[in-house]
Every structure is written in structure tokens, then in C-alpha cells.
Image (tube, helix red, strand yellow):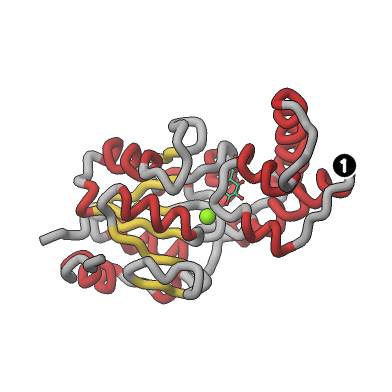
Amino acid sequence: MARLEAAIFDLDGVIVSTDRQHYLAWKRLADEIGAPFDRERNEQCRGVDRMASLRIVLGPGHRYSEAEMTALAERKNGYYQALIRQISPADLLPGAAALIEELERRGVKRAVGSASRNAAAVLERLGIAGKFQAVVTGHDFTRSKPAPDVFLTAAARLGAAPGNCVVFEDAAAGVEAAHAGGMKAVGVGRADLLAAAERVVDSLAEVSYADLVRLMEAAPRRG
Ligand code: BG6
Ligand code: MG
């Protein structure tokens, strides 16, 4: 039977609300190059790494070279980094700080597993960088979610068995990555998009240590 040994948190959309900053940065770039971009297309970038997000922003049939695309992604990142300089603990999503502290008190290992190469800077600004024994970011792996690499790397750094890890994710690709790594997943956000997760919540405020113990002890889902 699985037990609750470690919790691995996605960052953007789970711990912190960076949706607005990612949207504004992509929107500025898209406006500059005349690409159509709206909130719906931004939604498709949830959990997706920077270059793959750029491909979503540009859409099919664009004529940019790889070198030009790298420059466009860097330009967006410059806009994003300027926006996240304003991030403070007030941007923590509801329940995040309390759950992380409860898990710390209960001796549950904690990691961040994020596609973002800005994750370390965001955690510093939120004032919670010291709460995690491992922080795995887009710098640490090449295969992005839905590949399990990010979460398996986090589990290995924590010294935790993957089957004893629970992952918190706001992106369907992240839930898929957790399952591919043999972990259970709690979806944070839209139930229609995250239906594959063992449990879906609106925010981490709905989750307690006791819930997670039960979730880990429950039989794995079939199929
Ligand atoms: C994910 C976000 O966490 O990180 C995506 O959900 C983002 O929107 C991705 O594209 C990569 O982030 P960054 O900071 O490396 O551009
Ligand atoms: Mg996310």
C-alpha cells in the first residue's frame, strides 16, 4: 500500500497566480508581431514550456526560423521577468502556504516540479524557497510534461519512492506526467480539464494532511 512520503507541487497555477503575468507578456509579444492572441489561447499554454508555448502563440504556418523563434521566446521572457519583479507573498494562491506548513510539521517531504526556468526567482519573491527540500525546474530536464521526468527527478532528489508521492497540478499534461511516473495527482482548477486526477479541488485550501494520507492509502484507480 502506498503511503504519504512526499508532496510535489507544480508552481504556476498551483502555488502562485502567474497566469496574468504570462498572459500579459505573451500578449505584448503577440501584438508586436501581429499574431492573434487571447485568453483562450493563453489557456493552452498552461503547463507548457516556453518554446512550445511560443509555437502555440505563433500558430501553424508561421515563417520564423529557429533562431528567430529563440529570440522571440527571449523577448517574451524579458517582459515576463519585468512583471514578476512585482510578485510578493500576496500572490500565493489560497491555502498554499498553510498546506506546505502543515506538511512540514507532519514530516512530509516537499518539492517543486515546474516547467518554468523562472521558478527559483518566483519562489524567492514568494518567501517560500526554504520550504522545499528540492526544486526541479525547466533547467533540470529536457523532456517536458506530460513526460514524467520533472516529477521523477524531484522524487529522486527527495529520496522518495515515486509510488509514495502525490503531485499537485493545474495542467492536464501535468496530471498525465504524474501518472506516467507512477504517482497520484490532485488537480487544482477546472474539473473538466483535470478529470484524470485522483481528486480535483478549486484551491489548496480544500486539502489537508489527513486528506492526503487517505488519498495515498486508497487503492489505485484502474484503467
Ligand atoms: C509553466 C507555465 O509553469 O512554465 C507556462 O504554466 C510557462 O505558462 C512554463 O510557459 C515555462 O515558464 P518560463 O518561466 O520558463 O517561461
Ligand atoms: Mg501549472
Task: Give left or right: position of 37 versus 189.
Answer: right
The answer to whether residue 97 is above or below residue 133 is below
65 and 109: which one is in front?
65
**Percent position of residue 101, x then y:** 37, 60
The residue lying at 62 percent from left, 57 percent from top is 44
57 and 140: which one is in front?
57
User: Element at badge 1?
Assistant: helix
Q: Amino acid at mark 1?
A: Ile
Q: Quadrant of the C terminus?
A: bottom left
Q: Quadrant of the N terminus?
A: bottom left
The residue lying at 48 percent from left, 38 percent from top is 137
169 and 81: which one is in front?
169
The answer to whether residue 125 is above or below residue 202 is above
The answer to whether residue 192 is above or below residue 169 is below
Query: Furthest residue to the left?
Result: 1
The residue lying at 51 percent from left, 43 percent from top is 115
**Percent position of residue 75, x then y:** 77, 35
Residue that carries the numbered disc 1 in the rendered image:
33
68 and 9: which one is in front?
68
The residue lying at 64 percent from left, 45 percent from top is 53
**Percent position of residue 177, x then y:** 38, 50
